[in-house]
């Protein structure tokens, strides 16, 4: 199959040939959901920790005798009922990561790219590098692509040039990433994914 390519002025250029098993395969919602959840779970730090009554300092002595004071029975001033006491169900550090093997991950990425192409949310362009480091050049380029009103745009280049990075970093809702840094969450969460021809070819080699 072929994908249409636009040049820097927004005009249609020569199409690029891509593999159907990467950009035209059926969408597997269950697999994509599992991979996205696993990716987000792997980003969790899992460092939350609290002290239970055994870990709080102090509380070794019984505060008052068992009977005869008219007060409630108490065995420690570090009880969870007391101010400064331990937490009843104290949180412990834990690992939230989920196992996703390479075959599942690549299949999910193929399904995501196919769905982006099917929904016309994938735009292939000749190049993304502006002639100089000017944010206004990047704004004009996005307007020529018809993306001026898009809230979330992901720019994917084979290699991120200095002009591209510095010209787009101040644009709200615009993210720049190279092929090596692609992830399912960034692709799914973008309204439009703009890829250079070199990035499309690199993705084809990666997911082949």
Image (spheres, helix red, strand yellow):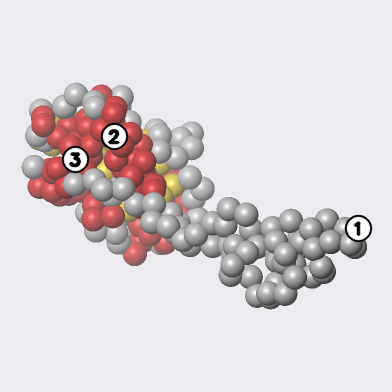
- Residue sitting at x 70%, y 61%: 79
Q: Is residue 97 above or below residue 56?
A: above
Q: Image quadrant of residue 90?
A: bottom right
Label 3: element kind: helix
Left-right relation of 151 to 156 = right
Instruction: Find the residue positioned furthest to the front.
Output: 68
Cα separation between marks 1 and 3: 66 Å
Where residue 36 appears, x then y in whole percent?
Answer: 34, 40
- Residue sitting at x 48%, y 37%: 151
Of labels 1 and 3, the one closer to you: 1
Q: Nearer the viewer, residue 40 or 190?
A: 40
Q: Is residue 31 above or below residue 142?
A: above
Q: Nearer the viewer, residue 123 or 180?
A: 180
Screen quadrant of the N terminus: top left
Q: Is residue 44 above or below residue 28?
A: below
Where residue 89 appears, x then y in whole percent?
Answer: 58, 53
Disc on the earlier residue, 1 or 3:
1
Does residue 13 appear in this view?
A: no
Task: Give the numbered dot on residue 32.
Answer: 2
Q: Which residue is mark 3?
A: 104
Left-right relation of 70 to 140 = right
Callout 2–callout 1 Cβ contact below 8 Å: no
Q: Image quadrant of residue 116?
A: top left
Of labels 2 and 1, the one closer to you: 1
Where residue 15 appears, x then y in whole percent?
Answer: 14, 33
Label 1: element kind: loop
Where residue 147 appears, x then y in whole percent?
Answer: 41, 36
Cα separation between marks 3 and 2: 9 Å
Q: Which residue is mark 1?
A: 70
| Label 1, residues with CA under 10 Å away: few <14, some 14-19, many ≥20 | few
- Residue sitting at x 43%, y 54%: 44
């Amino acid at each position: 199959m072929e994908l249409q390519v636009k040049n820097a002025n927004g005009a249609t250029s020569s199409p690029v040939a891509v593999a159907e098993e990467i950009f035209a395969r059926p969408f597997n919602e269950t697999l994509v959901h599992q991979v996205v959840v696993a990716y987000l779970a792997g980003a969790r730090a899992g460092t939350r920790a609290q002290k239970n009554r055994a870990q709080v300092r102090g509380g070794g002595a019984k505060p008052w005798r068992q009977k005869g004071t008219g007060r409630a029975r108490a065995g420690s001033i570090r009880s969870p009922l007391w101010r400064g006491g331990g937490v009843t169900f104290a949180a412990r550090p834990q690992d939230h990561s989920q196992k996703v093997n390479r075959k599942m991950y690549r299949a999910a990425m193929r399904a995501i790219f196919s769905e982006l192409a099917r929904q016309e949310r994938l735009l292939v362009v000749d190049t993304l590098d502006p002639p100089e480091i000017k944010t206004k050049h990047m704004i004009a380029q996005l307007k020529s692509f018809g993306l001026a009103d898009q809230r979330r745009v992901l720019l994917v280049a084979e290699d991120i040039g200095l002009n591209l990075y510095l010209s787009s970093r101040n644009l709200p809702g615009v993210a720049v990433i190279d092929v090596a840094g692609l992830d399912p969450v960034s692709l799914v969460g973008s309204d439009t994914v703009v890829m250079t021809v070199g990035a499309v070819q690199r993705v084809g080699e990666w997911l082949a």
